[in-house]
């Protein structure tokens, strides 16, 4: 990848020519190794689209049906490919429709470059047609943003944008280019950005902290690991596995850390957090050393901070200095990319195992299985459960699929029950909780990993927030598998209404259209399942299909997701019913 | 932990959007700024924000982390009042007639170590630089006579310790990703 990009850069340099800013945008993208972008044209970005037309053999543009879809598709692409996702739109409403996707990428640390057109620089501040201050709007939700008003600034700004988006803790960057900068001319010369003087992408690791961490780990009697997406973003899956296996420490994951370690790994003890597993939540408040790896102690993970792991020494492996002591104080903070820090600490830790401690997790697992999991995966009721759909998908895909989930009950069920053998397999909107994320993200996820099966698990509510992206699937023929778990409710909100608002179901019941007919309207093969005996056959048919496929499963209307830590409660007060 | 006054110094690149980025960090957390001053610094092309806030030390540490996280921020520091030398400047615009009609105002001016910046037949402008308390004391003395205009700057401060910004800039070496 790196070498390929270098060659391309040299080629681009050699052609150093007079060109428009719009053409320069294309050459910059090519020099960064981009071959796929998502977007939607419009007035202020038309010069760039005109160049996209000329370069369509080198740079593939996917026309989404809404700019929000372009951002989520770029996110999905970034999450499965590990590369920077690129989205492009026009000024005004085009740019503002990017906002949700940008905010989602910011909170989930997804590398993304968004390019927006802007009105001519002479019109800035005049309330011109489709003028909006997207720099002002996107400032709090971008890692960096910049407005270009001169053609000659385009290469350096885009080079910096890509560097910032992918380096250190990744994130979204927005570059706003005025129309006159797109039309203006420049002598094109591209140099990849190798650093920004005010920005240290990866902090130095103090070797003392490695010794201190190793000492705590080696002395621990009941240590526990919680790993997050930092492992995946840092490409540190192998280092994590080595660390876990040598230390013998039970390891739990955050929702975005899921799939960094195979779900079947004997030391994988499940998910922490609000709808996580019983054992790791309970035992967070029993462990003596808590080793946090590339995670940020989100409130959905910690519950009440006053009662969170107070008994434990906390070791925090982290790339972003602002995360240290933000929510949970670290006794030892090991700064740096976890790929390096985990590799460096490996020789310092003893080979160990914690049989009786691990047994405590297993005992909680038994309780959770009897009280929650058994009924979810093998329901005794007539109505279908979301869990049995996931079990069916696991059976067909053998844990090799990428699962893209939306937001709500089905998302928690998907993350709790999906089995994963490979990293970068769980694509979900974790931090922002963006309903409507999954359908467009699945498009990007499949394009980012074309050799892999991609299954989107979506609720009937979130599905209708970006349902128009069926048009993108139809047009591109991208073979994603779409599963809508339909309970005719905004299920998670309804669950909260049941538990905390005396069953006052305010505006959560959905009167839904015929989803199968809608999918068929887009010429997507579609099926509805209402009975248990039809489920596995339908899943098998869906997975076997070489084309896009839509499967609606009508599930029990009023099932709840458990376990659950009520908002503001302690992780040890996790409820099983 | 109790709230106290902190002076936050932020060294940055020259970037139009940075003011927005930095103020948004405070706004999001409902933190009122006592004062906010932007200026050049001792280093060419490096700008400096001097921000005064009332908060706990634990809060201010987190704020510094969020500020430093911004790409074009070079370094941010926080200091307690006794760790800095700080001043504010105020301008008082006063009707010139008062100099003759209210003779005691001349004594107030003399005793206050304030400077007369300009005098016209209609008004004169008084400048007072000092700590907030000193400026406020002068304000309290002059206010009963009637002020045509009054304005006070934000705090500017230098620290007692060395800042080493140039060294920090040298240490930002390009890195391979």
Image (spheres, grey):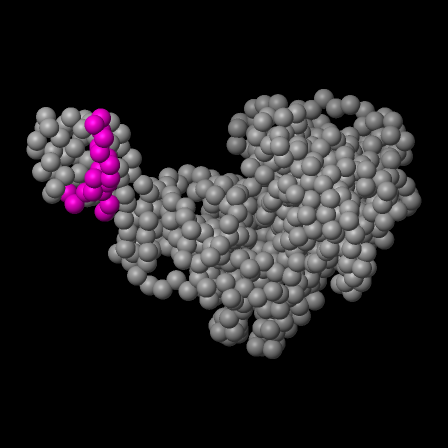
Residue at image position (78%, 65%) is: A3
Residue at image position (11%, 36%) is: B106
- For residue B89, side relative to residue A64 (left or right): left
Residue at image position (57%, 55%) is: A295
Magenta stretch encompasses residue A441? no
Q: What secondary structure prevails in the magenta region?
A: strand
**Position above or below: A3 against A61:** below
Q: Which residues are magenta?
A: B112-130
- For residue A407, side relative to residue A473 (left or right): left
Q: Position of residue B2 (x, y in %)?
A: 29, 49
Residue at image position (32%, 46%) is: B155
Q: Quadrant of the N terminus of chain A?
A: bottom right
Q: Nearer the viewer, residue A141 or A56?
A: A56
Q: Quadrant of residue A353?
A: bottom right
**Position above or below: A70 against A129:** below
Q: Position of residue A321 (x, y in %)?
A: 51, 58
Q: Nearer the viewer, residue A331 or A33?
A: A33
Q: Quadrant of the C terminus of chain A?
A: top right
């Amino acid at each position: 990848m790196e070498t390929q990009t270098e060659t391309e850069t040299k080629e681009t340099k050699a052609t150093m020519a007079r060109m428009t800013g719009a053409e320069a945008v294309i050459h910059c993208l090519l020099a960064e190794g981009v071959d796929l972008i998502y977007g939607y044209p419009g007035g202020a970005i038309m010069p760039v689209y005109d160049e996209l037309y000329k370069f369509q053999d080198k740079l593939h543009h996917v026309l989404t049906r809404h700019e929000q879809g372009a951002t989520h598709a770029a996110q999905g692409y970034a999450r499965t490919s590990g590369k920077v996702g690129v989205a492009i739109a026009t000024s005004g409403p085009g740019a503002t429709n990017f906002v949700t996707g940008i905010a989602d990428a910011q909170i989930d640390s997804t590398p993304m470059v968004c390019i927006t057109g802007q009105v001519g620089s002479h019109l800035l501040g005049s309330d011109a047609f489709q003028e909006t201050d997207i720099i002002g709007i996107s400032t709090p939700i971008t890692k960096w943003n910049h407005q270009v008003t001169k053609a000659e600034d385009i290469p350096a700004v885009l080079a910096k944008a890509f560097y910032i988006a992918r380096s250190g803790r990744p994130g979204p960057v927005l570059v706003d280019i005025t129309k006159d900068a797109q039309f203006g001319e420049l002598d094109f010369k591209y140099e990849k950005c190798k650093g920004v003087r005010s920005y240290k992408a990866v902090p130095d690791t103090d070797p003392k902290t490695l010794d201190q961490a190793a000492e705590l780990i080696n002395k621990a009697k009941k240590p526990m690991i919680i790993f997050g997406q930092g492992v995946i973003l840092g490409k540190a899956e192998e280092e994590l596995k080595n660390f876990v296996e040598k230390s013998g420490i039970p390891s739990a994951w955050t929702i975005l850390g899921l799939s960094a370690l195979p779900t079947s790994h004997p030391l994988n003890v499940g998910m922490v957090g609000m709808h996580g597993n019983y054992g790791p939540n309970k035992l967070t408040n029993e462990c003596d050393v808590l080793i946090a790896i590339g995670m940020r102690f989100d409130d959905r993970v910690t519950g009440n901070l006053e009662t969170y792991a107070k008994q434990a020494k906390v070791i925090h492996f982290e790339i972003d200095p602002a995360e240290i002591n933000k929510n949970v104080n670290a006794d030892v903070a090991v700064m740096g990319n976890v790929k390096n820090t985990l590799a460096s600490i490996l020789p310092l830790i003893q080979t160990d195992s914690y049989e009786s401690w691990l047994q405590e997790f297993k005992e909680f697992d038994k309780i959770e299985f009897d009280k929650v999991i058994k009924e979810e995966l093998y329901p005794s009721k007539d109505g279908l459960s979301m869990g049995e759909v996931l079990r069916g998908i696991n059976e067909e895909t053998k844990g090799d699929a990428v699962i893209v989930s939306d937001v709500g009950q089905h998302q928690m069920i998907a993350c709790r029950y999906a089995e994963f053998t490979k990293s970068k397999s769980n694509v979900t909107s974790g931090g922002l909780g963006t309903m409507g994320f999954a359908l467009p993200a699945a498009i990007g996820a499949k394009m980012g990993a074309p050799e892999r099966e991609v299954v989107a698990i979506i609720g009937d509510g979130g599905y209708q927030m970006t349902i128009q992206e069926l048009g993108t699937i139809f047009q591109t023929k991208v073979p994603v598998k779409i599963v809508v778990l339909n309970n005719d409710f905004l299920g998670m909100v309804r669950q909260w209404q049941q538990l905390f608002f005396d069953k006052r179901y305010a505006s959560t019941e959905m009167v839904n259209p015929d989803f199968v007919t809608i999918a068929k309207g887009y010429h997507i093969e579609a099926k509805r399942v209402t009975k248990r005996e039809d489920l596995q056959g339908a899943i098998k048919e869906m997975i076997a299909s070489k084309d896009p496929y839509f499967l609606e499963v009508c599930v029990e209307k009023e099932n709840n997701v458990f376990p659950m830590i009520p908002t503001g409660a302690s992780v040890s007060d996790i409820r099983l019913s | 932990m109790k709230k106290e006054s902190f002076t936050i110094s932020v060294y940055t690149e020259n970037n139009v959007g940075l003011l927005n980025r930095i103020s948004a960090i405070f706004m999001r957390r409902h933190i009122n700024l006592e004062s906010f001053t932007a200026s050049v610094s001792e280093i060419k092309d490096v700008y400096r924000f001097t921000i005064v806030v009332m908060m706990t030390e634990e809060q201010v540490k987190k704020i510094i982390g969020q500020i430093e996280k911004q790409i074009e921020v070079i370094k941010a520091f926080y200091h307690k009042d006794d760790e800095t030398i700080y001043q504010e400047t105020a301008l008082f615009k006063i009707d010139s007639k008062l100099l003759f009609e209210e003779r005691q105002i001349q004594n107030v001016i003399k005793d206050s170590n304030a400077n007369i910046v300009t005098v016209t037949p209609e008004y004169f402008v008084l400048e007072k630089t000092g700590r907030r308390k000193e400026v406020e004391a002068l304000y309290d003395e002059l206010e009963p006579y009637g002020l045509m205009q009054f304005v006070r700057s934000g705090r500017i401060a230098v620290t007692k310790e060395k800042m080493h910004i140039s060294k920090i800039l040298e240490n930002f070496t390009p890195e391979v990703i």
